[in-house]
Amino acid sequence: RPHLHGFVAAVASSYPAPPYRRMDKSSQATRYIPAKEIFDLQPDFADDVAAANFPQTVLRFRNDRAAASVGLEGLTNEEWVRHFGRFEPLPGNLPRPQALRYHGHQFRAYNPDIGDGRGFLFAQLRDKAGRLLDLGTKGSGQTPYSRFGDGRLTLKGGVREILATEMLEALGVNTSKTFSLIETGEALERNDEPSPTRAAVMVRLSHSHIRIGSFQRAAYFNDKALLERLTDYALRKLYGEEPGNNAPAQFLGRVVERTADLAASYMVAGFVHGVLNSDNINVTGESFDYGPWRFTPLWQPGFTAAYFDHAGLYAFGRQAEAIHWDVAQLAVSLRPLVEAEPLIEQLERFPQLFGEAMVRRFCWRLGVVPSSDANAMIQAAVRAMASTETQIDRFFFDWRGGEPREGTDYSGEDWAAFREAVAGFEAREEDQHPYWRDAAPCLMHIDEVEAIWNGIAERDDWGPLHAKIAAVRRMGEAMGTGPAEP
């Protein structure tokens, strides 16, 4: 099992709701490009299912920015609700939702009794660049894999996922996009929050819903044909590569590269996913499925997001280790197709790739050009943040471009090593966006998340949510285009 602890440890209501479009005619026919590639993985990969028949469908959030990337921003609100609340098929797309089959390690215990239990793949389509994307659901009803669950999603869970994905996208993390949230008029009983609570159905836009757990299930049943189809699908459809002489090792290498970058992006964002089980790791390295997530205010390696993570398995400082462990389970699943040695070689690249990604992403958020001295600078910054209990977001905001913000005081001895290390770094570009003249950085800490939800729960006040989305997107504009994918 990889050990990365040492490196990681070192290193409001006055706003109106957005003006949802109400158009007389849909423009989807001009830019919407349907796809049905998921059928390449049949048989024995997914089950036809039907969406729940909800009492109500009240549109609460539509992500027109994400919709524009796939040619669906022209849908009227009525069309939007029909497709993403009632799940009328998109033209030329999947005729019926597909509940995907997979297994997974959950907190290191193998579980063969999972799968899409409250969601399904609703549609596949291509963006402007031709990239294959999925529209998948959460809270859309029971499936053959629901076990004893009701197949529903709390409205609070949907609101939290909007906030998580918007903030992560602004901070350059490769994340799914919360595409739609529709309240469904049901009252749900939950053991871990006040009940009854309001229900919703959510749609996310993702670069695939193929998980490490999808490969684990195929290996569990010794289904070599499905393993081969999954590997070929991932390389051709998701990575745009022709399979070479050793397709499994080639594929594993891409997953290692993307997930090492994902782990680093979490650290630099100060983000704790909370449940990094192997069924929650997408083989494209895209982050998704946000349950008990948190942004840690301080650089505390032991900070956890899930109240049930008693051992701190998925703590802030252990996320790289956890993701590497999950990728190792993918390697194990590929063993029926190839000898171990080339898979081990790919796995062993993870720590170095993680370190390189930390440099790339830390320097990007700091707004400086990476150099050969970046490791020392990052370690000095992490030590200073930890010893002085300086907020992560405050640090990056105050030191944007490699120089301290006017009016701030970082003169103490704890910051001496960092001041010396960062002095030789060049600013990546001049920051002209007015965000950098704000008094404080945009945050996404738990007290504000809870306050936003309380306004909805108590007064049906959606203004603070929409205001926060606008503020986060403004920060994202100021941050600029994220670092290139590996």
Image (cartoon, grey):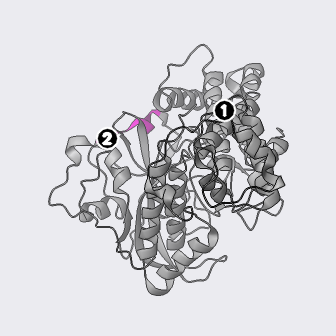
Residue occupied by mark 1:
256
Q: Along the horizontal axis of the image, is 200 left or right of 191? A: left
Picture quarter containing residue 124? top left
Q: Is residue 91 visible?
A: yes
Q: CA distance from mark 2 to mark 1?
A: 30 Å
Which portion, as a residue range, is magenta?
A: 33-40
Above or below, comparing residue 303 to residue 193 in the picture: above
384 on left or right of 54: right
Q: Residue furthest bottom?
A: 458
Secondary structure of residue under mark 1: helix
| Above or below 325: residue 90 | below
* Residue at x 36%, y 33% (from the top left corner): 130
Q: Amino acid at mark 2?
A: Pro
Between 92 and 301, the one lying in front of the other is: 301
Residue underneath mark 2: 34
Amino acid under disc 1: Val
Mark 1 crowd level (few <14, some 14–19, many ≥20, 10 Å Cα): many
Report x, y in % for residue 113.
66, 53
User: Of callouts 2 and 1, which one flags the residue occurring earlier in the amino acid sequence?
Assistant: 2
Q: Residue furthest left?
A: 24
Query: Where, quadrant-wise, is the C terminus in this rendering?
Result: top right
Residue at the image position 45 percent from the left and 86 percent from the top: 459
Q: Say if residue 11 shows up in the picture.
A: no
Q: Name the quadrant of the N terminus.
A: top right
Q: Position of residue 237 (x, y in %)?
A: 46, 30
